[in-house]
Image (cartoon, coloured by chain):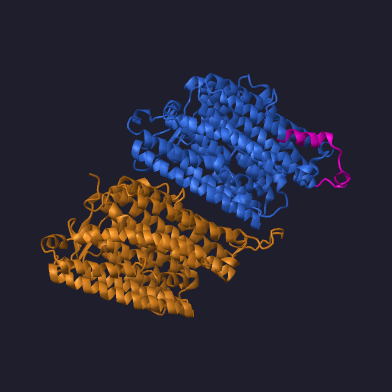
Chain colours: A blue, B orange
Amino acid sequence: MNFGWQALPLYVVLISVVTAMLIFALGEGRQHVRTTLNLGGAILKLALIMLMLLAIQSGASFEFRMSLLPGLDLVLHADRLTMLFATLSAMLWLITTVYAIGYLEQSPNRARFFGFFSLCVAATMGVASAGNLFTFFIFYELLTLATWPLVVHRGTPEAFAAGRLYLAYTLVGGVLVLIGLIWLHALAGGSDFIVGGSLAPLAAGNENALRTIFVLLMLGFGVKAALLPLHSWLPRAMVAPAPVSALLHAVAVVKAGAFGLVRLVQDVFGFDLAASLGLADVLAWLAAATVIYGSVLALRQSDLKRRLAYSTVSQVSYIALGVATGGMLATVGGLVHLVHQGLTKITLFFCAGNYAEGLGVHSIEELDGLGQRMPVTSVCFTLGAFGMIGIPPLAGFVTKWYLGAGAVAAGAPWIIAVIVASTLLNAAYFLPLVHRLWFRPLPEAMAERALAIRGGRMQALVGPTVVVAAMALLAGLFAGTPGSPLFWVIRMVGGES
Amino acid sequence: MPSELLIGLIFLPLLGACLTVLPWRWSTRLGVFAGLVSLPVLLVALTLAVIREGAWYYSLGGWTAPLGIRLFVDPLALLMLWMVAIIGGVAAAHAWHDFRPGTPEGARFWPLWLLLTAAMNALFLSADLFNLYVCLELVTLAAIPLIAMAGTATSIRAAMRYLLLALLASLVYLLGVALLYNATGTLDLYLMTQTLAASDGPATSLAFALIAVGLLLKGAVFPLHVWLPNAHASAPGPVSAVLSALVVKTAVYLVYRLWLWTLPAEDPMQGAVELFAVLGAAALIYGGILALLQERLKLVIAYSTVAQLGYLLLVLPLASVTAWQAASYQLLSHGLAKAAMFLAAANILHAVGSDRLADLERLDQRTPLSLFALALGGVSIMGLPPSGGFLAKWLLLEAAWQEGRWLLLFVLVLGSLLAAGYVFRILAAALRRADPTEAEDAEGTSPIGRRQAGYALLLALLALLAGFGAAPILEVIDAGAPAGWSAP
């Protein structure tokens, strides 16, 4: 155990835990103290992560290790993949907190909400910086626990039904991971994440055991990543308040699942082993099917948030698809989408929240002409939608470009067909929305409806929306410059493996 | 020096019990202080001694076995003693408010409580079967009036039922002990082994069978659990906590002692461990399902105890060092988590006036701290990280995997999913709002309510911390693994 400078990843996790505990302790009143705490925690965490980022650039390494059981350590470390995810979630936590403070103004149970919100981010940071599968699992399950109160936050029977479904899926998924983990532990001991995986020496004679373990873990992580047969909890969880949806879709739950798949392929099995056992293909097919299926279902949704939810089902699977295709280019495409999808999707959810709060708009038909009533939000929404479709030079295009090039390089041209089909479908379900916003006339009833958000609340909601939309735009526009997510990912994939 | 520690652990609570019988308020205070607060201090010294010297015997009054009475302490006994000190101590602090010294309730409560503490300590330190019988009886006889302390018709009926079944169990157990004494000429748990190996026959098998039935009945192991749910659910909160966390474990502890220490490895009665595992599995499933069906909070928690006891028996056929760690850690973390849940439930019952799940809406505003403790305890009971319960479940799964017990593995997983079901059912009931749009009404918790919630929270936090502090605890525990269970 080392509690010094080396243990910085631990402190990054603890900041959010402490914030959560303080918020719980404060209780419902004292809103200003809570807001200060919330923002202070988020800013402090972001600062620490920036510090770590700089230190890692100059060759430092971070690791905190503590023995939990004989032969099993709790390991928190910071490699490049950690930093990619950690930076994303720390930034978006700060922005979402600002948004949530505005969004939930005057609604009940805010202490509970922000407490679990922070706990959720703590779990995400743990997932990001976990140094072995065992540690990963601990935070992965903690994430389930911390998000359930957020999903049922509204306290309606509908919310509880969604919460039940969420638990049923994630707890069973957790059990699958646990069994795979026990098996792996019996086979290989508690080994740390290593780029390229640590299982290759064991492969001879254990092929089928390793295949089964991979499938167990893949399904377990697939639940949160909303892989094809395991996705149906996600659209139902849309009953949660908008900041929760944003967090769930862009940084926390869904991403944790996708991140688990990345770790599984890259750092537990190693792509070469996964490919030689035929497992990478299984994951690639499953991800490709999810990409198409999610888009098809998104087409059929008339509720805005549900359409976005199915879009997430589809988009998150790009990450798994890229990693499972293998090769430098496709891997870059998959990993960078971790950030790109996060930024773009959070923009769209913030916009959906603004429409719902501002004018009570929930369904797609009501979007007609809203470009006039809420121009800033609508511009952001349009940017997000274009990003999702992958119109150059937005972030989604960068992802798709690398995925496509990677598919060719890896000799899997069918993936290009998947990407093209998915792009067409994305356009088919996003362009009509953009069309409605800007080119349909504003119905009279809507023109007369008073805007429910104004003043400071307006700034708290629209400000973060603009910031994330700008980030999504810049990530695509300056993808080639040092400091961009793409640049970071290329250095990670090219430099370390 | 350490021998005085053993005597102190038994006689200080006993002395305390005598003091609390006296009519003055200060004598009750002094008695409780002498009997409970002293325990952790003694245990620190005892722990250091056990780490230094390993397990050892002490002959009372210098009379050695087979004539004299021997006390025995090893890491397992030490673990149980610590649980009595910590869980019993926190539960006593919680009880202090409802059973104040100087009131009639307090006068009835504290002598029994201290007697129960002394009897449990004596039980965990005893090395011979007859002493153990006496201690078991004392534990039961002290526990029954504590259950009836609530004074309601349900609690008295539950206590009576417990009394009758416990007496039956004691008789059966005693009969087994008599048979064993006849066959071996000794009552000492650890001396009996050699004699048993030499003189094996149907009589000793019958004896062990009788003892097993007696213990399973006292330990409320499925299908002999019928007395437990009502007894544990209708007792006052601190009593429920101690009953579920400690009292039923005394019987499980004795099953461990007899089957893992006394009974020779080649004895045919060793086959009973398979039966124990089947009963444990059945308890896990049955208790879990019944907990899911209960309409009252305390009954859910009580049935959860029936289920969780199953884990402790499931371990018996696994016979490995991992299984040993799993059993010890399950004893510890279930004790902490379950006691926390019962104390929290008592606070909730007190604040709401009912513990029907249907009446528990908006608990996050009405009793936030107690609900938090309940939830944290629930996390450990479900075996989700980070908690002691998670590490225990991990070790259990690992042990089952090492032995290739796939069916057990399946049952373990099913059991934890059922636990998740009933815990989240409670939490969902507690977060519900009759009218989701209504504004919050800030009902402040009274300082007393906060303090009472603090005790539940303390135990829940300990259960959580157990998820991080396993390494040093298991190091001590490992040294006490029974023969045949230690590392090859």
x, y percent for residue A362: 75, 46
Q: Is residue B116 left or right of residue A24?
A: left
The quadrant of the picture occupied by the C terminus of chain B is top left
Q: Is residue B44 magenta?
A: no
Quarter of the image where one finds residue A475 = top right
Work out whether A168 lies above or below B304. above
The residue stretch that appears in magenta: A429-452
x, y percent for residue B127: 22, 64
x, y percent for residue A305: 69, 43
Q: Is residue A450 magenta?
A: yes
Question: Can the viewer see residue A11 in this picture?
Answer: no
Pick whichever, A288 or B265, lies toward us: A288
The quadrant of the picture occupied by the N terminus of chain B is bottom left
Work out whether B101 lies above or below B301. below
Work out whether A203 lies above or below B87. above
Quarter of the image where one finds residue A418 = top right
Q: Is residue B383 left or right of residue A49?
A: left
Of all residues, the one furthest to the left in this rendering is B198
Type of secondary structure dominating the magenta stretch: helix
Pick whichever, A35 or A112, lies toward us: A112
Residue in the picture at 67% in, 52% down: A30
Pick whichever, A91 or B36, lies toward us: A91
Question: Can the viewer see residue A38 in this picture?
Answer: yes
Q: Is residue B217 left or right of residue A399?
A: left
- So how many labels did they put on this image? 0
x, y percent for residue B180: 17, 69
Quarter of the image where one finds residue A49 = top right
Residue in the picture at 55% in, 62% down: B450
Pick whichever, A126 or B95, lies toward us: A126
